[in-house]
Amino acid sequence: MQRDTLETVIEDLRAGRVPALTVEDFPAFSEEATAGDPHIGPETLATIAATLTAADIPTFERALRAVDEGDLAWLGFKVVYDSAAAVGNVDNEVTKKYGDVGSADGESLVFFCNDAKEIVASRELSPRDIFQAKDVTRGPSMHNDQFDGLTWASEPLFGKVRVWLLGASDAAVEVAQLADHVGFKVIAVDYDPAFLNAERFPNAERIMLHGGSFDELANMPARPDDYVCVLTRGHMFDPEGCIWALQNDAHYVGMMGCAGKNSTVHDLVVAAGITEADWDRVKRPIGLKFGAKTPAELAIAIVGELVDVRYRQRYSEEARHRHEKSLGRD
């Protein structure tokens, strides 16, 4: 989320104006994100904006501070479409009990929540609201529509992880679609427009190299928090991809290929001055292991691994420990 968006909302509320909330700033309410949901959509933003008052300023101020501090935090939205149902619905016979009260007051609410479970809101939340507020901002959000009368949405206050796809292979096409779907910023790189084009990579930033090679990679900086997937067609430029990713100290580097091919790439990469320690950082073969063979299956394996790496990188040690324990790998 942009810092100036939060500043503008705060200024409007201080001046007694109804802030203009747009899907550009809050894409969780876009037509694409809410397709098929009868209770939330772009028009919901205007309804929410009309409920905001000066009492909500601390919520947005806390969000602004989170942006400045790089906190793992979200703005959350409790969207009530049937007040009586929202208040009257209580826990069912299957889920954990959170008391005999449904939604706290049957009114929509904007709130702040971060990985440390700090919640800031203009009004008190019920125990069940608190559970759902935490769930929508960091979990699988399976409970958004668990109860009648209300639903939940959230916007992250931190940027997307950038994933570089080096090579416009068929596997990269599938990875690009799935990685975009789960919230990564995808950058696809190749030198051949027959493979790197809008039809194959409609949602990715596309960088076209020149000269029929990946030599121009050297002129493009990556960031230390970027992820790099080396997926060049025919593995022809895998060495150049690995060298570039390691020289830029990318957080994650993965390369597709068999052991024999990887041995050849190893020799070429080390000959270029990369240390053995850095070479060992390359995940090879890339992706989780579950028998994936086709490009689509490989994409599931690769993006599954990217999601796991992102989770390990972003969440607090306490949150990671809880999750690792639940996965049986602590």
Image (cartoon, grey):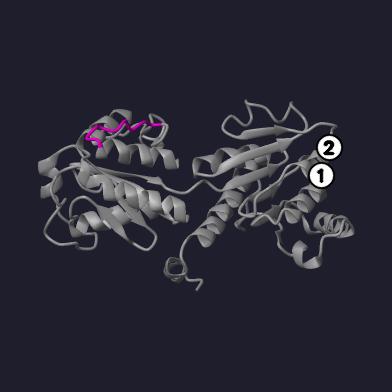
* Observer able to see residue 140: no
> Circle 2 sits on which residue?
213
Apparent side of residue 289 relative to residue 53 in the rendered image (left or right): right
Q: Which residue is drawn at 46% across and 65% down?
A: 316
> Hey, which residue is sitting farthest right in the picture?
271
Q: Nearer the viewer, residue 131 or 61?
A: 61
Report crowding for label 2: few under 14, some 14 to 19, many 20 or more residues within 10 A (C-alpha): some
Question: Which amino acid is tagged 2?
Answer: Ser
Location of residue 19 in the rendering, given as x and y in whole percent from the top left corner: 29, 33
Give the residues in magenta.
15-23
SS assignment at label 2: loop
Q: Does 172 sit above or below residue 270?
A: above
Q: How many numbered marks, from 0 up?
A: 2
Apparent side of residue 33 relative to residue 48 in the rendered image (left or right): right
Quarter of the picture holding the N terminus: top left
Report crowding for label 1: few under 14, some 14 to 19, many 20 or more residues within 10 A (C-alpha): some
Q: Does 252 sit above or below residue 54?
A: below
Q: Nearer the viewer, residue 140 or 76?
A: 76
The earlier-in-sequence mark between 1 and 2 is 2
Q: Nearer the viewer, residue 140 or 153?
A: 153
Q: Residue at x 77, y 48 (%)?
A: 241
Question: Which amino acid is tagged 1?
Answer: Phe
The quadrant in which residue 295 appears is: top right
* Observer able to see residue 15: yes
Location of residue 103 in the rendering, given as x and y in whole percent from the top left corner: 16, 50
Residue 237: mark in rendering: 1
